[in-house]
Amino acid sequence: MSLADGHWAPLEAWPLDEYEEIVIFDEWRTLRHVSSRSLARTRALLQVLGYAPDDVGHSTLGVVGSKGKGTAAAYASAALAGLGHRVGTVMSPGVISNADRIRIDGLTIGDTSRRDALRRIQWARERLPEASEQTGYLAPTGLFMVMAMLVFAEAGVDVVVAEAGIGGASDDLSHWRLDAVAVTAIFGEHLDLLGPTLADVAADKAAVITADTQVCLTGAQSPEPAEVLRQQCAATGTPLVTPSQNAVQSASHLPPGLQRDNAAVGVAAGLQLHARLTSPAPEESQASAVQGAALRQTLVSVNYPGRMSVHTTPTGQQCVVDSAVSGPGLAAALKFARDRMRTVDQVLVCLPPNKDLTGFIAELENFVGRRVFVELPEAYTGMPDRSEWPWEWVTQDSLAELLDTGNSLVVGTVLYTSLVLRTLGADAKQLFTLP
């Protein structure tokens, strides 16, 4: 049913998740095959709401990149909260469901706040011209960001950590003035949307860095994205900083590799923004000096399932869940799983056609154990052809039983890992714990 159909039952007649599904996803489901997201439509929605992104009562840290944005956002939020800030976090996508996209001080917001924000967005949508192929649609990632910002304004947070959906200038994150930007590794993904080249992808993401941005934190980048970031920061007068040793050490409890690197970027961004909020002339040494017991405890407590997280099935089997979608990502997850579980009996994979299935197959060529592709028949992303996977192929109906047959590494897109986490009974309500 569309909002434009005019057949709405009273709000209280709709379960919250169904109500959210309609308000947030309605235009996208109707138009995604014939049109594209519209930043202009989001701006119009914000105007109807009476919300001005350039006049908010909080500082904003934006997180962009190709991989690891969620990890960076989680650790930036934990660092800022551990340093005493009241932090709103909006992540894209959710870990287990859309309900955990929006958090305050690490906790998911309550149902009343969600419903109130959805009601305001519904009201504003009804006052816009009807969406069409020509106008484009309100992107779900953008609407969740709008929803989050409405909640944060009501709650009076002093810092917001906002993870971009896809891109930077082409993402709804670009509506907000960013006081700090964290950039995780940029790869040649979404070339059809942001490309056609890697430099184009990097330019789109880097464009959220403006003259208002006080600092940009970046991890290791390949030469093209590194040069794009350097030029953008030079043009805007924004200091371009890499994580200090203190920030890297703060993430040392994580396994080596991208997860630790992205966490360090997030911690460093949080420390840098904190320093600028508390000192007129921040220095890296001042930022590192504030790291005390409360900060360390908060960072160690981060609970971000689906990123090399370890779980136990009802029958006592172990399972590592990771949202890697490339061959190197799978290799890192497999090494971690072997270190934690000693034996990995099976690797359970699910990828859409546009991800690195070839890389996955190459990494698993010499794996001794079951290599199973788990098909999600209703996935909007689509599935590869059965003939492209050389080993076992099952549907999601077999997932629960499969997880109980041995120690598993589960790896693939968030759509899949969130299903696995729900099957395992994982809890994502609390991103971190304040001492």
Image (tube, rainbow, N blue to C red):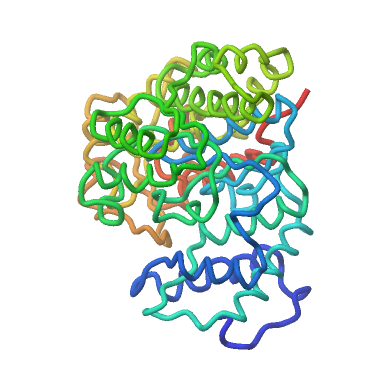
Instruction: Name the foreground residue: 333 vs 139.
Output: 139
Residue displayed at 44% across by 54% down: 171
State the image quarter where residue 251 is shown.
top right
Q: Which residue appears at 42% of the width and 34% of the height?
A: 237
Counting from the top left corner in percent of width and height, residue 232 is at: 35, 38
Does the rendering let one see residue 75?
A: no
User: Can residue 117 be seen?
Assistant: yes
**Percent x, y for residue 61?**
56, 39
Residue for point 33% across, 31% down: 230
Position of the C terminus, as image quadrant, is: top right
Residue 167 drawn at (x, y percent): 39, 49
The outermost residue toward the bottom is 6
- The answer to which image quadrant residue 108 occupies is top right
Left or right placement of residue 290 versus residue 1 in this view:
right
Taking 74 as reference, is 171 left or right? left
Residue 42, placed above or below residue 284: below
Relative height, residue 160 to residue 132 (above, below):
above
Above-or-below relation of 159 to 241: below
Residue 98 appears at what percent x and percent y?
59, 53
- Residue closest to the eye, 145 or 257: 145
State the residue in front, 235 or 91. Answer: 235
Considering the image in quadrants, where does the N terminus appear?
A: bottom right
